[in-house]
């Protein structure tokens, strides 16, 4: 019974392992990002105005007039960029949205986002809607479920079984010692005293002889 309860507790502990939703960021300089053509311009400190680079993630961006491909593994993705025209977004080859800059202001915006994707590998494609228009790409964020460190089931169960076995052995040893002590006390109380007395000669009175 004790072993069954211990194993049940260990199973519940192991069963509590769960995944944690974690965000990852890929900026325009990431080697995971593929530019169909070499970017027209790369903004960085010393190249662009410091007031502008301060708005950028990692203070860099890439401007291109061709498609950008970004592989990622996750269930959600968020795209940050700037364009004065329109751009479209595909995930795994399927058109999923577009972005239109309705103002004349140049700024980095959350141009597209989606959640609820299967938490697996995907390919995001960003491309200009009109030939010759450009996209200033800054970064993307994607979310992925990361399992927590798995517990070693065998080690846990082995430790539980070992602990229970040790408890049983110690309990059995204590029981045997108590039982022997009890028997010894009973034996001491039940010993006939004559069995332990040596034989002694009969007493004779001097001057007396047996009657005839």
Image: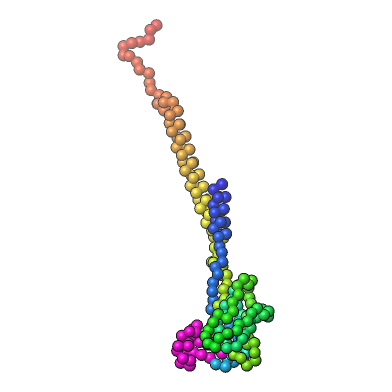
Which residue appears farthest toward the right when viewing the image? 94
Residue occupying the point 63% across, 87% down: 128
Is 48 magenta? The answer is yes
Q: Is residue 152 left or right of residue 92?
A: left
Where is residue 63? Give x, y as percent: 56, 90
Query: Where residue 29 sits: x, y (%)?
Result: 54, 86
- In the rendered view, would you say 168 is above or below 94? above
Nearer to me, 52 or 24:
52
Q: Magenta segment, which residues?
A: 42-63
92 or 14: which is nearer to us?
A: 92
Count of labels in the image: 0
- Tell whether position 162 is magenta: no
Can you name the residue that lies furthest to the left here?
207
The residue at 52%/56% (across/down) is 159
Quarter location, residue 11:
bottom right
Compared with 167, 142 (above or below) is: below
**What is the residue that sits farthest to the top in this orientation?**
212
Q: Is residue 205 left or right of residue 99?
A: left
User: Which quadrant is the C terminus positioned in?
Assistant: top left
Q: x%, y% of residue 5? A: 55, 50
Q: Residue at x 48, y 47 (%)?
A: 170
Q: How is the image coloured?
A: rainbow
Q: Nearer the viewer, residue 169 or 86?
A: 86
Q: Is residue 31 visible?
A: no
Q: Position of residue 192 (x, y in %)?
A: 44, 26
Looking at the image, which residue is at 56% across and 64% down?
Answer: 18
Do we see residue 70 in this rendering? Answer: yes
């Amino acid at each position: 019974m004790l072993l069954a309860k211990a194993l049940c507790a260990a199973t519940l502990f192991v069963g509590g392992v769960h995944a944690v939703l974690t965000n990852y960021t890929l900026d325009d300089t990431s080697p995971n990002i593929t530019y169909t053509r070499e970017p027209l311009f790369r903004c960085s400190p010393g190249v662009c105005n410091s007031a502008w680079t301060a708005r950028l993630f990692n203070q860099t961006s890439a401007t291109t007039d061709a498609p950008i491909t970004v592989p990622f593994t996750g269930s959600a993705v968020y795209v940050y960029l700037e364009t004065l025209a329109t751009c479209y977004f595909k995930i795994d080859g399927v058109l999923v949205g577009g972005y239109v800059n309705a103002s004349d202001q140049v700024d980095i915006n959350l141009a597209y986002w989606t959640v609820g994707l299967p938490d697996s590998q995907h390919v995001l494609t960003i491309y200009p809607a009109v030939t010759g228009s450009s996209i200033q790409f800054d970064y993307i964020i994607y979310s992925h479920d990361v399992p927590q460190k798995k517990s070693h089931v065998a080690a846990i169960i082995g430790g539980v079984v070992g602990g229970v076995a040790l408890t049983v052995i110690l309990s059995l040893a204590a029981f045997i010692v108590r039982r022997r002590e009890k028997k010894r006390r009973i034996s001491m109380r039940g010993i006939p005293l004559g069995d332990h007395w040596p034989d002694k000669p009969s007493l004779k009175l001097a001057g007396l002889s047996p009657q005839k």
